[in-house]
Amino acid sequence: MDDVIVRLAGVSIKNFKNVTSGSLSFENNRREYKSSILGLYGQNGSGKTALIDAIAFLQHILCGREVPAGFADFINIDSEKAILEYEFDIQLPGGRFRVFYEVSLRKEENINERNAEYSLNNQKKYRPLIFNEVLKTLIFSTKGKNRIGKLIDTNTDDVFSPRSKLNLLVGKKKTTRIDLLAAKKYAKEYSRSFIFSHEFLTAVRLQTENNDKDLLLYAALLEALAKYGKEELFIVNTRNSGMISLDAQPFIFKYEDKSIGALGTVMLPLESPIVIPQKMLSMVGKIICNMNIVLEQIIPKLTIKIKELGTELIDDGQTGVRIQLMSAKNSKEIALKYESEGIKKIISILQLLIVVYNQSSITVAVDELDAGVFEYLLGELLRIISEKGKGQLIFTSHNLRPLETMDKGFIAFTTVNPSNRYIRFNNVKENNNLRDFYYRDIMLGEQNEMVYEPTNNAEISFAFREAGEVVGS
């Protein structure tokens, strides 16, 4: 499936965190680029992180993994359920297709997790419940009127509807249906997707032996989405920056060469040396070598390296290597822990940015991309990736420098209206400086939705003075 390209084309969110309703297209309607970039800007608490969390939720869904318990708390406090819809652009050898996936999320009390401690302090523990999964795409008709319609809808007592697609995708064997009903119940019990579960995908794979043309297409779309979630969608949230503050260096990576292929996150402590398996040493060494090609260009003469401090046996009896992460500049080496948090932040995501630049079917979503990064460098990196890159980068930021360096079609904004959280600016001319345009809208409110809740400097000043009097009394 190397010739398959999956892009996240848009997201629609309802009652998720502080977003009552919000829809955002990730496609640039102004100009055509190989890359797909979306920078989201807005006031604190206006729904930027909600977008990244919605994409993180999608990753768990597509991987068929259990959705973490914390997502139960992401349902808007005034609502019983959240609804999230994702639009995909999928390029297969046989053509290009639009796929829509919708899922509902609610929380319920997790009785199995309750114990005496929870009962005593009158607290309840909740778990997320995934339900009403719907997958839509192009449905072929014998009458020649092809249309976007439901391929799979789990909101039924049967395995799924419509029945014609059920027969096509998994066949008519009674034993298969019984097994899938059990798998559907299991997925619900353990907060997992049924559509992207191992059991359902396996049943579809077995059915493709029939070589039905429509079946092969639908199976290819399902496989493309599952692979995308497992290997091509990466989330970098603020927890990564938090780990840096706690003297741990995350390396989030997707790396392939003739001898090795790997992806994931490696967390290496900075405060003291660590022992890692010898096999991991080779992989981390190659990733760092690859990163250094770019690192010494964006931070002149700076590279990072692994210093080996000897070998010792680890718990499973294998040979481990004690290592310390170092940085090198002007022929001098120091422990990486002494570098700035900005440099550590760049190092943590640099390999993913390299992949975004070079590979089409890759999506990286980063919350607070600008944290600790020099604004001029941030603007130039994003300019290069947006103009010359091939993959998809979605990020939130408070630093406005990219508004001056990137195509205006790559930028979106949050509003103060929870019922219409995400907008693109209207009436932006080619020669407008989007940064100045944004400031002007904060002051004058020229868009249909307010992007900033006004504050009063005199009242802020008075509040500071009043608070100081309380502290000093």
Image (tube, helix red, strand yellow):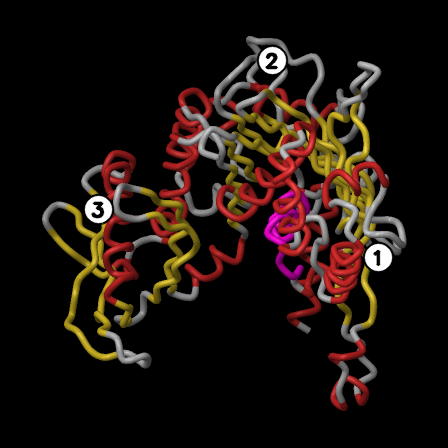
Q: In front: 194, or 288? A: 194
- Figure check: 212 above or below 312: above
Query: Is residue 44 on the magenta stretch?
Result: no
Query: Is residue 57 on the magenta stretch?
Result: yes
- The residue beneath circle 1 is 77
- Figure check: 325 above or below 299: below
Q: Is residue 158 visible?
A: yes
- Figure check: 145 above or below 396: above
The percent coordinates of residue 336 (x first, y second) are 27, 58
Q: In front: 254, or 36? A: 254
**Which of the marked residues, 2 or 3, is nearer the chain's N terminus?**
2
Give the amino acid type for the residue marked by disc 3 in the picture: Thr
Residue depicted at x 74% and y 88%: 117
- The residue beneath circle 2 is 30
Binning the other alpha carbons within 10 Å of mark 3 as few (below 14), some (14 to 19) or many (20 upward) gives many
Find numbered disc 2 in the image and state the secondary structure of the residue it sits on: loop
Q: Quadrant of residue 354?
A: top left
Give the amino acid type for the residue marked by disc 1 in the picture: Ile
Toward the left, the furthest residue is 331
- The residue beneath circle 3 is 303
Residue depicted at x 59% and y 41%: 223
The percent coordinates of residue 161 (x first, y second) are 85, 43
The span from disc 3 to disc 1 (Cα, nearest Å) is 47 Å
**SS assignment for the magenta stretch, majority:** helix
The span from disc 2 to disc 3 (Cα, nearest Å) is 38 Å
Binning the other alpha carbons within 10 Å of mark 1 as few (below 14), some (14 to 19) or many (20 upward) gives few
Image check: 253 left or right of 188?
A: left
Find numbered disc 3 in the image and state the secondary structure of the residue it sits on: strand
